[in-house]
Amino acid sequence: MPTYRKLDSFDESKDCTQYVERMEHYFNANEIDNEGQKRDIFLSVCGKNIYKLIRDLLAPAKPGTKSLADLTKLVKDHRDPVPSEIIQRFKFNSRTRHSDESVRTFIAALRRLTEHCNYGDTLDAMLRDRLVVGIKSDRIQRRLLAEPNLTFDKALEIATAMETAEKKAQDIQASGTNATIQKQVNKVSKSYTRNNSGNSKQGDCYRCGGNH
């Protein structure tokens, strides 16, 4: 049986749901199929505070009498209760792209917000609409609105392509501006050098009029 690194203890400052997901991947990678063994591994790595919480929530029953699914649900329901669907949808529909945020980072943030929105088969349509409305770029928004039969995948493709093109154009303009500035600096520098050279050749003494 393969053995992949020891499972990390649960960090109480982190999300419980993500830890349970990682734990399932750990079991799969190590080919651990026995449900009792899975439960015992979880109870041995969950940490003393979580173990005490489980004991308190189950009392008078003992943690070893429950399944892993029962234990993880118990902890998740206590620590990470499912948020209100309405509130999560409000957060999703209020989200707009930040000024320093790339299109793909914006979409990643939107996807995180949909976790408890229960959009089902309408998810792509909701992501498309939020991308168009919240893009915070008049130029990209006009282009997306002009596209017939716009899908989410197409909207993301257009938005990222335009964002990339705009960044490259800015880089080119900045490069051209820097080159122009450097050219002017070089011009002034050469002019200054010529003037200094001319002045050093004159070298007339203000008293006798001769060169020293």
Image (spheres, helix red, strand yellow):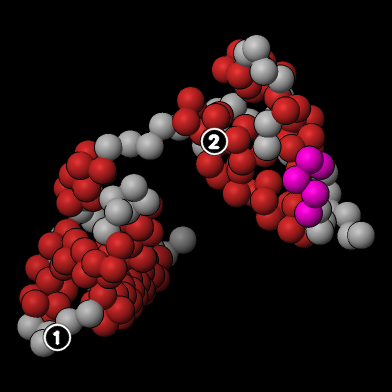
Q: Taking the image as drawn, is residue 211 in sight?
A: yes
Is 12 on the left-hand or right-hand side of 39?
A: left
The amino acid at mark 1 is Asn
Q: Nearer the viewer, residue 127 or 123?
A: 123
Q: Residue furthest right?
A: 1
Is 174 on the left-hand or right-hand side of 50?
A: left
Residue displayed at 54% across by 35% down: 73
Q: Where is mark 1, residue-wise?
A: 149
Q: Tell me where residue 156 appears, x and y as whole percent.
A: 29, 75
User: For residue 165, what is the image quadrant?
Assistant: bottom left
Label 2, secondary structure: give it: helix
Q: Tell me where residue 169 appears, x and y as whole percent.
A: 27, 79
User: For residue 194, what is the image quadrant?
Assistant: bottom left
Q: Where is mark 2, residue-wise?
A: 73
Q: Nearer the viewer, residue 211 or 104?
A: 104
Residue displayed at 63% across by 13% down: 59
Q: Which residues are magenta?
A: 33-37
- Is residue 36 shown in magenta? yes
Q: Taking the image as drawn, is residue 170 in sight?
A: no
The amino acid at mark 2 is Lys
